[in-house]
Image (cartoon, rainbow, N blue to C red):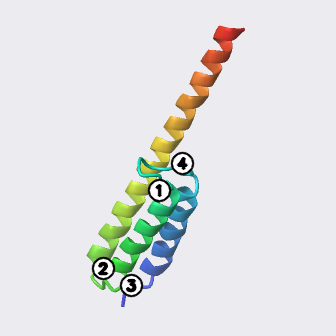
């Protein structure tokens, strides 16, 4: 079994990833919604690691998962700020 502290951390990370994935409401080049692809990928990865018992591997998986989540959130936020700046710049040009 996994260390007792790993389960709540994994569940928190899983839920946080799903909350973040909901923000990705556009489709990829094949017309597949990104939020569904991210949700399915997250589920597969967590299922693959479900039976891991080595505390070091579990800690590494949680750390990598957290970093990937933070990177995705940062890129999403930066893209949103760039869009906002472009909208404000276009408003200034038309005024």
**How far apart in space, not on screen, are marks 3 and 2 (Cα)?**
7 Å
Height in image: 79 above or below 15? above
**How far apart in space, not on screen, are marks 1 and 4 (Cα)?**
8 Å
Residue 91, percent across and down?
A: 68, 16
Residue beneath disc 3: 3
N-terminal label among 1 and 4: 4
N-terminal label among 3 and 1: 3
Residue 23, percent across and down?
A: 58, 52
Q: Are marks 3 and 2 in contact (CB under 8 Å)?
A: yes
* Quarter of the rendering containing residue 6: bottom left
Q: Residue furthest front?
A: 30
Mark 2 vs mark 1: in front = 1
Mark 4 neighbour class, 10 Å CA radius: few under 14, some 14 to 19, many 20 or more:
few
Q: Are marks 4 and 2 in contact (CB under 8 Å)?
A: no
Residue beneath disc 4: 26
Height in image: 87 above or below 92? below
Mark 3 neighbour class, 10 Å CA radius: few under 14, some 14 to 19, many 20 or more:
few
**How far apart in space, not on screen, are marks 3 and 1 (Cα)?**
37 Å
**How far apart in space, not on screen, are marks 3 and 4 (Cα)?**
38 Å
Say which quadrant the N terminus sits in.
bottom left
Residue beneath disc 1: 32
Between 33 and 31, the one nearer to me in the picture: 31
- From the viewer's perspective, tell me whether residue 67 is left or right of residue 80: left
Between 7 and 88, the one nearer to me in the picture: 88
Q: Are marks 3 and 1 in contact (CB under 8 Å)?
A: no
């Amino acid at each position: 079994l996994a260390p007792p502290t790993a389960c709540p951390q994994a569940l928190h990370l899983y839920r946080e990833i799903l909350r973040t994935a909901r923000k990705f409401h556009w489709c990829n080049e094949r017309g597949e919604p990104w939020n569904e692809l991210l949700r399915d990928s997250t589920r597969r990865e967590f299922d693959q690691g479900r039976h891991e018992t080595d505390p070091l591997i579990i800690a590494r998986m949680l750390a990598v998962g957290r970093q990937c989540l933070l990177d995705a959130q940062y890129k999403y936020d930066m893209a949103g700020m760039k869009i906002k700046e472009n909208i404000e710049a276009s408003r200034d040009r038309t005024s």
